[in-house]
């Protein structure tokens, strides 16, 4: 499939909503090479072994009680797009129910924008812990985008098995967080729903999106801390190369990242890591893990830059 076919799918967007989700999937996939997914049984088992090892090691280091999702998929880029289109469809349903001015034009523009975003991200994402927000299920899922993992390992000049294992450990840290905090998925859902519902009513709930951003900063920051404690090998070079990858790319790539909010994602990693490093330096990993005991123990935006305030506020963390 070609970019022309992708554009044709967007132009043919139909339906009554603000986004034609079927056209989004078709357009994003048409604009993206799916990548090779011809894994041997041994190669697929190596992913599974990394996930199992990460689970056991993270349980041991963190003391958190959790398991990995039953759904662990090795995907190509099209698989990832299809899975995330379903999440987008659920999240933005309130917008689809809202009438728009010039609906045909707006629908095509919204469809094109969403398809372009998913196509771009699908070429860069390595793994994803998916809490399946707003889905009618309590199950979560874990994805590895194999063509991107192979390409990234090659471009970074690191051995594929070691890099694959690093990515597995990182994604399983998110399983540890959501497993240790059964309330976390609902917490994120509530703020996401509030923000999107307000947009559907023509309002901007900055507080809801700000709380969502702070919570995700805690999620990413704790994951970085736990990775450093748990990964069973040397990681300094991997950390440095991945940090450079997050900041790098061509000027056009950097522009896309900023437009899609991926710059905020990098800031979440860095700001969250600094917060939890400061907490762990004072109280150890157990003190940092208190963040998952109660929604009220999540740091505020101000506390992310003042860890000592969080330490003084949270019982058992001081």
Image: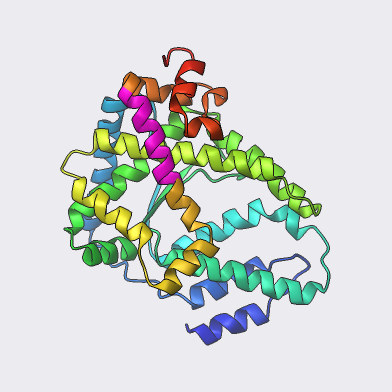
Can residue 78 be seen? no
Residue at 18% over, 59% down: 158
- 68 to 45, vertically: above or below: above
Numbered circles on residues, count: 0
- Residue 313 percent coordinates (x, y): 51, 17
Dominant SS of magenta comes to: helix
Left or right: 281 with respect to 201?
Answer: left
Residue at 18% over, 63% down: 157
Q: Quadrant of residue 68?
A: top left
- The answer to which of 234 and 267 lies nearer the viewer is 267
| Quadrant occupied by the C terminus | top left
- Residue 40 percent coordinates (x, y): 23, 62
- Residue 81 percent coordinates (x, y): 49, 63
Is residue 294 magenta-colored?
Answer: no
Q: Which stretch did the figure color magenta?
A: 268-281
Left or right: 130 with respect to 194?
Answer: left
Can residue 38 be seen? yes
């Amino acid at each position: 499939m070609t970019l022309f076919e992708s554009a044709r799918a967007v132009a043919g967007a139909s339906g009554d909503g603000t986004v034609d989700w079927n056209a989004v999937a078709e357009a994003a996939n048409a604009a993206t090479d799916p990548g090779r997914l011809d894994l041997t049984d041994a190669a697929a088992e190596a992913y599974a072994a990394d996930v199992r090892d990460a689970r056991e090691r993270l349980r041991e280091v963190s003391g958190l009680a959790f398991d990995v999702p039953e759904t662990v998929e090795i995907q190509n880029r099209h698989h990832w797009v299809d899975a995330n289109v379903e999440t987008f469809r659920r999240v933005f349903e309130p917008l689809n129910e809202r009438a728009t001015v010039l609906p045909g034009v707006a629908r095509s523009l919204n469809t094109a924008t969403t398809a372009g975003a998913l196509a771009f991200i699908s070429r860069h994402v390595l793994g994803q812990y998916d809490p399946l927000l707003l889905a009618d299920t309590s199950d979560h899922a874990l994805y590895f985008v194999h063509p991107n993992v192979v390409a990234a390992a090659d471009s970074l000049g690191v051995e594929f098995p070691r890099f694959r294992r690093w990515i597995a450990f990182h994604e399983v840290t998110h399983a540890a967080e959501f497993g240790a905090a059964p309330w976390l998925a609902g917490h994120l859902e509530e703020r996401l729903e509030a923000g999107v519902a307000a947009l559907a009513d023509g309002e901007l709930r900055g507080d809801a999106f700000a709380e969502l951003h702070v919570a995700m900063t805690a999620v990413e920051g704790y994951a970085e801390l736990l990775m450093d404690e748990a990964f069973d090998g040397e990681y300094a070079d991997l950390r440095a190369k991945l940090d450079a990858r997050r900041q790098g790319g061509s000027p056009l790539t950097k522009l896309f990242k900023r437009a899609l909010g991926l710059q905020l994602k990098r800031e979440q990693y860095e700001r969250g890591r600094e917060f939890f490093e400061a907490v762990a330096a004072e109280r150890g990993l157990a003190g940092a893990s208190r963040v998952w005991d109660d929604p009220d123990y999540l740091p505020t935006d101000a506390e992310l830059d003042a860890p000592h305030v969080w330490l003084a506020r949270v019982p058992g963390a001081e």
